[in-house]
Image (spheres, helix red, strand yellow):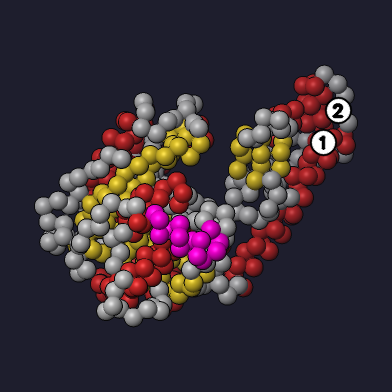
Amino acid sequence: MNRLLPKLRTDIDVVPSPDSEQPGLLIRDPYRYTPAVLLIPPVLIQALAHLDGEKSYLDLQTDLSRRTGQLVGSDVVENFVGSLQQQGFLETEEFYRLRESCHAKFRDSAERVAIHSGVSYPAQPEELRKELGGYLQAAPGKADPSPSGIIGLAAPHVSPSGGWRSYASAYARMGPELAEKTFVLLGTSHYGPPEKFGLTRKPFITPLGTLEVDTNLVDEIAGRAGDAVCMEDYCHSIEHSIEFQCIFIQHAIQHALQQSPDHALGSRIRILPILCGPFRESLVTGKAPESRESVERFFQVLGNLAEREGSRLFWVLGIDLAHIGRRYGDSFAARAGQDRMESVRQKDQERLHRVCAGDREGFFDLVRPEGDELRWCGYSPLYTFLKVVPQARGNVLRYEQWNIDEESVVSFTAMEFLRDGTAAGAGRTGASFPKH
């Protein structure tokens, strides 16, 4: 019997091998259902196209024989498919079991552990403090916004070593008076379902200590926002956009308290972590995200909470901006600050000016054409913030472009947000756009 081949998962990463001595494609799982990384040699790359659930084992065997000019045995096909299947890269029972096991493990865990510790930043507390301290010490001179005026900031979520200047520019704004607030963390959900918001009640553990979640606020949102919420969202277990903000918040607050004799040490930092899934539907239809009823309901719930809690909250957005170059599907290589990236800088600037002005509709008008040609992964957190805190006005503190690899660039920013009309932002809100 000629069996059909299983389907290759569409949510895995497939990238060229960086090792010239081992050419081919690397397959890995961004969801971390499996830790395996498989190398697909050049002769088998075309075989991946057969894994669509419609072609058969015999089809693949015949195609490989034709391409190589020699008879390929059925055992080659069986071993190739079997390796992918065993590691959970195909839509088979093996994958479903791995996925459910990982989701259950996160649901049942008491804590959200720092999964990027020791990889993206040091795992040892003193080493991490030294690294973050060096970043903040090298930041531009700290402004002195009124504690009653600054209501939030935006920082990158690229690797701290790549975006440290923008991280530092943002977190240098934090003073000891923020220690008693609840930090509302709006992070990009790179892996979550579109038009959904991921919540968790689990405390976040980092090398610098524990960030307690304000579970009363989490429960209120989950109870009122209905199916817009993914409760105990597995994506929290793997996502970096919020984790990176956590370590900078901890360090900035701990350092600020040490420098201030008027504030007691040992403050327990409270957070409200929210992963914002992509607003994909809005980029397809051209209609605002709130045109979907569930998204509008979430905006209303979070907006009411923001109005009620007022100054007890401090907003932190973990966002990146444009993604340009071969890594992101472009046919050309990109270099930070050169050629095409100057046009990207100008377009980024236009969007950020709309954000600084609190112009949500104008911001969306610039994002939606062509399904967002700049691929701003910070679109959903920024739009959510503009919708639920309409009185916010912003200042761009720093703007950067960074080559994440030799042919691809990510842009990002540091921003502060102030209440409209406060002295701290009067006359200058959104007026400057540093070019670094």
What amino acid is found at the position of numbered circle 2 in the picture?
Val
Measuring from the top left, give residue 100's x and y in whole percent.
66, 62
Query: Disc number at residue 291?
Result: none
Measuring from the top left, give residue 112's x and y in whole percent.
54, 68
Q: Which residue is mark 1?
A: 77
Q: Nearer the viewer, residue 317 or 73?
A: 317
What amino acid is found at the position of numbered circle 1 in the picture?
Val
Q: How dense is the environment of label 2, judged by Cα within 10 Å: few (below 14), some, or many (20 and up)?
A: some
Q: Quadrant of residue 51?
A: top right
Q: Quadrant of residue 82?
A: top right
Q: Are marks 1 and 2 in contact (CB under 8 Å)?
A: yes
Q: Is disc 1 placed on a helix, strand or loop?
A: helix
Q: Is disc 2 placed on a helix, strand or loop?
A: loop
* Highlighted range, magenta: 122-135
Q: Nearer the viewer, residue 11 or 434?
A: 434
Above/below status of 95 relative to 19? below
Residue ID at (32%, 76%): 180
Q: How dense is the environment of label 1, judged by Cα within 10 Å: few (below 14), some, or many (20 and up)?
A: some
In the figure, is residue 90 to the left or right of 115?
right
Residue ID at (59%, 46%): 11
In the figure, is residue 295 to the left or right of 45?
left
Q: Nearer the viewer, residue 59 or 232?
A: 232
Q: Which residue is mark 2?
A: 72
